């Protein structure tokens, strides 16, 4: 498989502290790739570097061969990288379907002004049809008329994924996608990630503390500790790595 994301020698310093200290790894196009590590390992800083919310101190980030290090977040999103955050209701009075429709139209080359274009957006059959498709893909078709604040935690995270998919990304970043979920919600989220990756030929890079989730769906795993990569490979090799067991997993394989 071809490399979609190539991170090389990435460094981010805050004063004298290196939160990310020479991180290098590659993500193959069409793969599901996990980044794991203990709290404070540098995962969140790494994701903020990838999405443009932090500028790197050194190193390169190449997306489909283009160096995106230091670009503004909206420019990186336009190039095909989107991140799913904890859900925030941008338009609290709009339904789930309407929020996704508005996210879709915001990505068009000439998006309408948010308030002035509201009626036109909701009357655009093409946009609304695409919104319906997205909601079906993330399992929210049956709650399309509800406000986000009325959704369960699992459904809120699914809506967050739908909003990220509305940018039509090539690479989707998921930050702790199953955090706070019940076992049922976790199982549903895992199935959704696998389904989306396959159906959309989507590349997924995610961080996660639930090792059952990580080992069940990741084709490759990068382990970081104190801002550095300490191991990388498939689930079996990572589980067998003694340094990983010592600093993160808590027991020998």
Image (spheres, grey):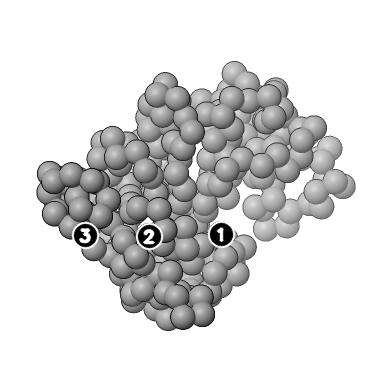
Q: Secondary structure at mark 3?
A: strand
Q: What is the tally of numbered marks visible in this picture? A: 3
Q: Where is mark 3, residue-wise?
A: 231
Q: Where is mark 2, residue-wise?
A: 41
- Report the front residue among 65 and 84: 84
Residue depicted at x 54% and y 35%: 157
| Marks 1 and 3 in Cβ contact (< 8 Å) | no
Answer with mark 1 or mark 3, whichever residue precedes in sequence.
1
Cα separation, mark 3 vs mark 2, equals 13 Å
- 35 left or right of 106 in image: left
Q: Residue 144, labelled with which disc?
A: none
- Disc 2 packing (10 Å; few <14; some 14–19; many ≥20): many
Answer with mark 2 or mark 1, whichever residue precedes in sequence.
2
Answer with mark 3 or mark 2, whichever residue precedes in sequence.
2
Residue depicted at x 59% and y 18%: 142
Q: Position of residue 187 (x, y in %)?
A: 38, 26
- 60 left or right of 136 in image: left
- 153 left or right of 95 in image: left
- 175 left or right of 252 in image: right
Residue 100 against residue 59 in the figure, above or below = above
- Report the front residue among 229 and 218: 229
Residue 117 against residue 26 in the figure, above or below = above
- Report the front residue among 59 and 140: 59
Q: Where is mark 1, residue-wise?
A: 77
Residue 141 against residue 246 in the figure, above or below = above
- Disc 3 packing (10 Å; few <14; some 14–19; many ≥20): some
Cα separation, mark 2 vs mark 1, equals 25 Å
Cα separation, mark 1 vs mark 3, equals 29 Å
Q: Secondary structure at mark 2?
A: loop
Residue depicted at x 51% and y 25%: 139
Quadrant hosting residue 43: bottom left
Q: Position of residue 42 (x, y in %)?
A: 41, 62
């Amino acid at each position: 498989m071809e490399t979609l994301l190539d991170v090389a020698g990435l460094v981010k310093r805050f004063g004298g502290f290196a939160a990310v200290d020479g991180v290098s790894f590659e993500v193959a196009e069409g793969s599901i790739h996990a980044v794991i590590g203990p709290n404070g390992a540098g995962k969140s800083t790494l994701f903020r570097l990838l999405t443009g919310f932090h500028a790197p101190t050194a190193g390169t980030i190449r997306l489909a061969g283009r160096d995106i290090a230091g670009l503004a977040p909206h420019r990186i999103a336009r190039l095909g990288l989107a991140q799913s955050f904890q859900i925030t209701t941008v338009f609290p009075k709009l339904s789930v379907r309407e929020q996704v429709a508005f996210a879709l139209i915001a990505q068009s080359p000439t998006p309408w002004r948010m308030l002035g274009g509201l009626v036109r957006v909701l009357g655009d059959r093409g946009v609304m049809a695409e919104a319906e498709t997205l909601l079906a893909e993330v399992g929210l078709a049956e709650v399309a008329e509800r406000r986000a604040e009325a959704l369960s935690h699992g459904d809120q995270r699914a809506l967050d994924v739908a909003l990220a998919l509305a940018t039509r990304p090539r690479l989707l970043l998921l930050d702790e996608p199953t955090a706070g979920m019940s076992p049922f919600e976790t199982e549903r989220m895992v199935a959704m990630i696998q389904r989306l990756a396959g159906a959309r030929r989507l590349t997924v890079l995610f961080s996660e503390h639930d090792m059952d989730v990580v080992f069940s769906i990741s084709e490759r795993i990068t382990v970081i500790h104190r801002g550095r990569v300490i191991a990388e490979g498939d689930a079996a090799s990572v589980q067998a790595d003694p340094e990983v067991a010592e600093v993160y997993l808590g027991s020998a394989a």
